[in-house]
Amino acid sequence: MIELLSLSLTPLLALLLVLFVTVTFKRRQKNLAPGPFPFPILGNLVQMAWINPIEPQIAFAKLGEKYGNIMSIQLGSVYSVVLNSFEVMEEYLTKPEFSDRYFNSWMSERTFGKRLGVIVSEYPSPWQQLRRFSHRTLKEFGFGKRNKMHPIIQAELEEVVRDLKERIEESDGVLTVDGYFTISALNLVWSILAGKRYEHCDPKLLRLNKVVKEFFSSSNTSTNILFAYPEWRNWFPDWTGMTLLRNCYRETNSFFQEIIEERKDLGVYKTMPENLIDEFLHEIESSGSNDDIIFTEQQLVGIMSDFFLAGSETSSNTLAYCILYLMVNPQAQEKLQREIDAVLPHGFFPSAEHEPLLHYARATLAETHRMGSVFPLMGPRTNTEDTFCGKFFIPKGTYIIANIHKINYDETYWKDPKSFRPERFIDENGHFKTDPRLKPFGFGKRACLGESMASMSLLHSLVVLMQNFTFRPVPNEPLPSVEPVNGITNGPQVYRALVECRG
């Protein structure tokens, strides 16, 4: 029996050895970036798990101390290059050849097995056409225009304040923050995307929000087993979590298709489009029936999915993190409230005239972006051709990982990166100052399309919340942890706050 087992294992061991030698040889032959020695089959997942099994950005930063700011990493079957410094990201991620999105068969399941939507579409085309269409159309319907955006934001915040007052009255002032701001963040996007907003208690929206939360928490773009071994999704769908993800995709895409059908039945897209969906439907009719057309209903579902996924979690997590940091740093919260009280009369909502006067509020959000690192690893990039990064060869199609967390916590630059200090974004005159190293919305052409709206809505949301409420730790409970829940996006752990109404 032992001899038989030995004979059966010998070919497998030989195969593993061949793979191991082949990967090593290729690295040396092509002058690839240095990195830890990859194990057969597993690659460098073992070393990463040894350093930090939950937060890959921490493992990448630690390995970068030894192997440099341009580093090779083998994630299972996926060869990758990690960028660990601002200088390298700024130089290379702004170049056209580094502007495509890495895309594999696992990621394609969300978009019908195709590269659809703005987030994962191929560079330069159709990405350029889709982004240009989305930007032009959203701008036409109010995206980025303060005179149109302010009433929408104000209407949403009025409901947030009203809802929060009711909640704390029912719970003796204690609020459990567990995706609490997601519906509000989503409505701000949805009101422009689809021309409608939902009541916060709408059961369809609450269910969809739950599905999206499950999607974001179920995976990440580095150590996820499906990312490392995309072919396993069909071999072990339950074990890899693919069954859960497919259910999420099915439900979200069905929801978007229902809205498309509603707009088609209404018919106004033919003569007087009211929103982005109507404009896209008009483009579909204008494009004809060529096989290579970009404007299709599946493409529209992909774009709606992009906005839904990006618009709900990122803003919600940023705002939840901001409240948490202010709660555990009460001196910063008091300073922020003094500024707001000096700039805004009580009961008034902020306007375009107030925004440039809210220096500490903008600094507080900047510091939240830095410390919270909602996207600790930038959206997956790849290179469109064989090229070089520094002196190292990058084969076409390499998965390129930008470790945003590393530049946000660089001790040589920020000095005390684990301290929450909005003052680092305030100049000697007490005015808000930007910092080129803070890149919460990404680098280059693939930077987030919704940056202007997200920045505006976050500022107004923070100001209105601080104007109306004070957030304190719950007495006789330990301070909430600021350690993240890791997924595709980072967010704070569920925490409880004692909320007091102001004035």
Image (tube, rainbow, N blue to C red):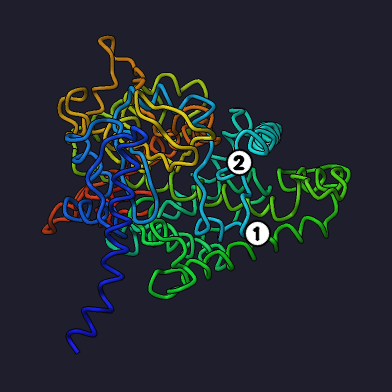
Residue found 38% across the figure and 59% down from its top? 217
For disc 1, the neighbor class at 10 Å (few under 14, some 14 to 19, many from 20) is some
Residue found 21% across the figure and 29% down from its top? 410
First along the sequence among labels 2 and 1: 2
In the picture, measured across the screen, residue 219 lies left or right of residue 326, that is right
**Image depth: mark 2 or mark 1 in front:** 2
Q: Quadrant of the C terminus?
A: top left
Q: Residue furthest top?
A: 429
The percent position of residue 226, horizontal first and vertical second, equals 41, 61
Find residue 446 and name its label.
none
The percent position of residue 334, horizontal first and vertical second, equals 23, 33
Residue 27 in sight from this viewpoint: yes
Q: Which residue is mark 2?
A: 122
Q: Establish if 134 lies above or below 39.
A: above
Total marks placed: 2
Q: Establish if 64 lies above or below 312.
A: above
In the picture, measured across the screen, residue 162 lies left or right of residue 68, that is right
For the residue labelled by badge 2, is the local secondary structure a helix, a strand or a loop?
Answer: loop
- Looking at the picture, which amino acid does disc 2 mark? Glu
The percent position of residue 332, horizontal first and vertical second, equals 22, 32
Q: Nearer the viewer, residue 69 or 212?
A: 69
The answer to whether the residue labelled 2 contacts the one labelled 1, judged by CB atoms less than 8 Å apart, is no
Q: Which residue is mark 1?
A: 256
Q: Nearer the viewer, residue 391 or 188?
A: 391
